[in-house]
Image (cartoon, grey):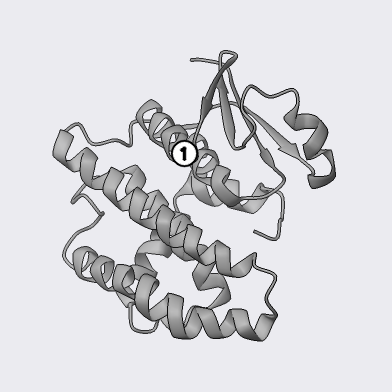
Amino acid sequence: MPEYKLIYFNAMGRAEMVRWLFAYGGVAYTDERIEREDWPEKKKSLPFPKVPLLMVDGKPLPQSLAMARYAAKEVGLVPEDNLQAAYCDALADTISEMMGAMYQIMMSDKDEEEKRRQFKEEFYPNVMEPVMTRLEKRLSDKEWFIGDKISWSDLMISLAFGNVKAKKPEIFQKFPTLSAHVDKVRELPKIKEWISKRPVTAF
């Protein structure tokens, strides 16, 4: 097994998917967390100017989704069938784009009232709700996103929508199957253990 170091801010953000995957697979790694005030100096020592960054035996692997796909393969959560694996990739890309759009609203310098308006009137009906609708339909007759076997797409669904559910549970009333799926993944013993012991951060 390679030696891993995951470098990111002291937050869940774009590194949390790799943390979930390593937790699921029981993979040992160094979870290096950078405080915001230390970032300008730390950046000078890194081979890439952005994080997250996964060091694999000292070799840098950038880009959060590439890191997640690699980790998913390492822990056996990528389907062997190439088309099914591509469906997982497509879902991961869709969720990543969705969450990126949501973070843009959350991190903007607009006041809280305007952020809530943007979420309710623009982002939710046009971006998030269509994704939730498709997932509700797909999961209604499947145990997991790809059928009868868990894959990293299931962890991606639970991570992304679980964070939303914690803050806006009311929007899941229309999506009971998706809501149950989010909870089912979080109840997996190793995922549950990680969630219980991870550092508490704002996002």
Residue 148 seen? yes
Q: Is residue 99 left or right of residue 47?
A: left
Asked if residue 163 is positioned above or below residue 12 in the image, the reply reads below
Instruction: Give whichever of 157, 67 is nearer the camera.
Output: 67
Q: Amino acid at mark 1?
A: Leu
Residue 150 seen? no
Q: Say which residue label 1 marks.
A: 21
Q: Position of residue 118 (x, y in %)?
A: 52, 80
Q: Quarter of the image for the C terminus: give it.
A: bottom right
Q: Residue at x 24, y 45 (%)?
A: 149
Asked if residue 147 is positioned above or below residue 44 in the image, the reply reads below
Q: Position of residue 15 (x, y in %)?
A: 56, 42
Instruction: Give whichever of 44, 28 is nearer the camera.
Output: 44
Q: Residue at x 44, y 80 (%)?
A: 122
Q: Residue at x 49, y 44 (%)?
A: 17
Asked if residue 99 is positioned above or below residue 171 in the image, the reply reads above
Q: Quadrant of residue 31?
A: top right
